[in-house]
């Protein structure tokens, strides 16, 4: 049964005085929580984190790595210990954005000293 069908059934039960309005409200609230859990989990756990490093001089790709999203949170916790502080990059903020299901390009950094561009995408 889909969520909209379940909601209609609850509203019909209220209309027919089978349950009180308060009981219906509790059921609708619980149904909403259940729906959020169903939609949030796949976006934060499925897909890939793609890291692409390009040489600025030649334009050639030096790194192109795809990491399953299931492993990203573990990697962020481990990597946060070893990653030097980068201006404008907060690892905790990045981890929270990934948990929220952010997609697209999330990091685009040019390292002039190393002559590289680092791009990170969530797909």
Image (cartoon, rainbow, N blue to C red):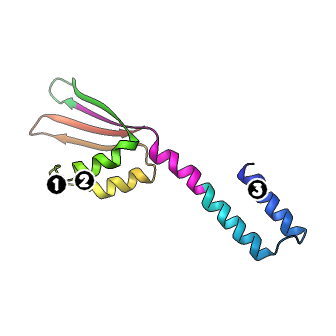
Q: Are marks 1 and 2 in contact (CB under 8 Å)?
A: yes
| Left or right of 94 on screen, residue 59 | left
Q: Outermost residue toward the left?
A: 113
Q: Is residue 15 above or below residue 97?
A: below
Residue 20 at x, y percent in the picture: 81, 75
Label 3 crowd (10 A; few <14 / some 14-19 / many >=20):
some
Q: Which residue is mark 3?
A: 6
Magenta span covers which residues?
36-53
Regarding residue 69, the answer to whether it shows in the image is yes
The residue that label 1 is drawn on is 85
- What residue lies at 34% left-to-right and 49% top-to-bottom? 73
**Mark 1 surroundings: few (<14), some (14-19) or many (≥20) residues within 10 A:** few
Query: In which image quadrant can residue 120 be found?
Result: top left
Q: Is residue 118 magenta?
A: no
Whole-angstrom CA distance, mark 3 to mark 1, is 49 Å
Image marks 3 and 2: residues in contact by CB distance under 8 Å: no
Residue 37 lies in magenta, yes or no? yes
Relative to residue 26, is residue 70 depicted above or below?
above
Q: CA distance from mark 3 to mark 2?
A: 43 Å
């Amino acid at each position: 049964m889909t969520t909209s069908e379940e909601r209609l059934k609850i509203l019909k039960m209220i209309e027919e005085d089978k349950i009180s309005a308060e009981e219906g409200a509790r059921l609708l609230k619980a149904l909403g929580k259940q729906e959020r859990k169903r939609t949030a989990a796949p976006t934060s756990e499925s897909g890939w984190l793609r890291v692409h490093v390009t040489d600025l001089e030649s334009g050639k790709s030096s790194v192109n790595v795809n990491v399953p999203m299931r492993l990203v949170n573990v990697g962020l916790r481990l990597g946060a210990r070893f990653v030097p502080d980068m201006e404008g990059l907060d690892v905790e903020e990045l981890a929270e954005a990934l948990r929220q299901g952010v997609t697209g390009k999330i990091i685009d950094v040019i390292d002039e000293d190393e002559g590289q561009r680092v791009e990170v995408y969530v797909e």
